[in-house]
Image (cartoon, coloured by chain):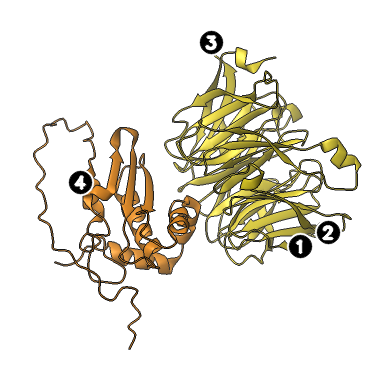
Chain colours: A yellow, B orange
Amino acid sequence: MDLMEKNLELVEIQKLEGHTDRVWSVAWNPVSSHADGVSPILASCSGDNTVRIWEQSSLSRSWTCKTVLEETHTRTVRSCAWSPSGELLATASFDGTTGIWKNYGSDFECIATLEGHENEVKSVSWNASGSYLATCSRDKSVWIWEVLEGNEYECAAVLSEHTQDVKMVQWHPTMDVLFSCSYDDTIKVWWSQDCDGEFECVQTLGESNNGHSSTVWAISFNATGDKMVTCSDDRTLKIWGTDIARMQSGEEYVPWSHLCTLSGYHDRTIYSAHWSRDDIIASGAGDDAIRLFVDSHDSVDGLSYNLLLKKNKAHDNDVNCVQWSRGEGDRLLASASDDGMVKIWQVATKP
Amino acid sequence: MVSGLINENPIIYPKKERRLRTDSSNTDEFTPEPIDQLEIFDHIRDIKDPEHPNTLEDLRVVTEDSVELDDDNSYVRVTFTPTVEHCSMATIIGLCVRVKLLRSLPARYKIDIRVAPGTHATEDAVNKQLNDKERVAAALENPNLVEMVDECLLPSDE
């Protein structure tokens, strides 16, 4: 199926209002989707210091705010991430702490607070098995936390090789390899040789490796984990790849290399990029637009991407985050913006 | 005795006469008036320098020409000139300009702030900080910094 041949559009399903300041991030609960027979759940976090949990009613199909996680973080909540089991939500805040929340049916309770960073925490990510958590901060460090029994979290590593503010951390979808991106314009890869919790920086993707020339804001992997997309203040998206089979079978680290740069499509900083399960890359930028890209499948030598569609004025202000839902084939996209809104979109064929 | 100011003897330029705005021919109260360069300059000219009892206009840190504007595309860029090359107040000044414009312009506006090329020792570093909205947002959650910015933005009693 060639997506480029279909006449596709991004349809706004619903606008979720409630936050009283800009919304920085959204995160779909991994175990809830229509396919699972469970109502999809979405978390959003904001400059209003709260996190909102939104749920879609199976009857009316409309989204409502189920609960507000407040009175815990004392400053902006910058990002949030669900554990792979869907039971826990981690929240990263400018107040320097990372909250761990558990869903107790009708309400959420903060069961742990991770401290240690010297200043604003920017991002939090769970590994595929839920045994590790990673956080990063303006203090230039990346922390890896081990998840222990009884709501205990132990700091397993403090990684200080970035030379500036670290914007995002993202675990590889299948392997315990951690990726981080920063204001220092680089992406760093952290790997533990003996899987003993001793992580070290095994690769830095910078300008000399065809990397970005300004702050890298986000990283996203494809479903199989052999490719990733990064987005930057330099107004480009870059696609990187590795030999995942070799990496998974062998003992040694297999480096990532640059495959493709998408430039000339964005006029302002690109804050977010997300790779869907069916290979559509969505981007959210400072020009208020959402763009979708797909592999052109026609390049003789190497990879190339085409713009599938551009949604102008997706929001009234910068788009800070775009996230595809986890369900198979539903092509739902959530977006968060400086305009204080969260929006749910559907990719559909034009009538 | 060292007073501690970065620039103890800033040049204070003579005050220019302010142009009167001509009557607008647009009498329809529902059509938003186009914003022009002078209006943007009016928002920032009276911002006080963090260290001296003078405005950014007095010290020629900003001039009308330092405002580049594209109202149709809701875009503005302000280029400011710190009074000395090693001015550590450059980020504060840039932040004051950004905050004043954020508070004064319609939300649709995209604002870029930069140091005039060649006028500051670490201009790339300053520019990067001033245009990273996450850094700006975090800085504006710092009460001490907000107090300093608000001081600079207070209208002075003439």
The residue sitting at 58% across, 64% down in the picture is A119
Question: Do the residues indicated by labels 3 and 1 lie within the same chain of the protein?
Answer: yes
Chain ID, mark 4: B
The residue sitting at 23% across, 36% down in the picture is B34
The residue sitting at 37% across, 56% down in the picture is B118
Tell me the residue that label 1 is attached to.
A157
Tell me the residue that label 3 is attached to.
A351
Circle 2 packing at 10 Å, graded few (<14), some (14-19), many (20+), is: some
Cα distance, mark 2 to mark 3? 53 Å
Q: Amino acid at mark 2?
A: Gly
Chain ID, mark 2: A
Circle 3 packing at 10 Å, graded few (<14), some (14-19), many (20+), is: few
Question: Do the residues indicated by labels 2 and 4 lie within the same chain of the protein?
Answer: no
A312 or A333, nearer to the observer: A312
Tell me the residue that label 4 is attached to.
B38
**Mark toward the viewer: 4 or 3:** 4
Q: Position of residue A203 (x, y in %)?
A: 74, 50
Circle 4 packing at 10 Å, graded few (<14), some (14-19), many (20+), is: some
**Left or right: where A304 falls relative to A267:** right
Cα distance, mark 2 to mark 4? 60 Å
Which is nearer the N-term, disc 2 or disc 3?
2
Q: Amino acid at mark 4?
A: Leu
Chain ID, mark 1: A
Cα distance, mark 4 to mark 3? 47 Å
Q: Are marks 2 and 1 in contact (CB under 8 Å)?
A: yes
Asked if residue B5 is positioned above or below residue B148 in the image, the reply reads below
Cα distance, mark 2 to mark 1? 8 Å
Question: Do the residues indicated by labels 4 and 1 lie within the same chain of the protein?
Answer: no
At mark 1, the secondary structure is: strand
Q: Amino acid at mark 1?
A: Ala
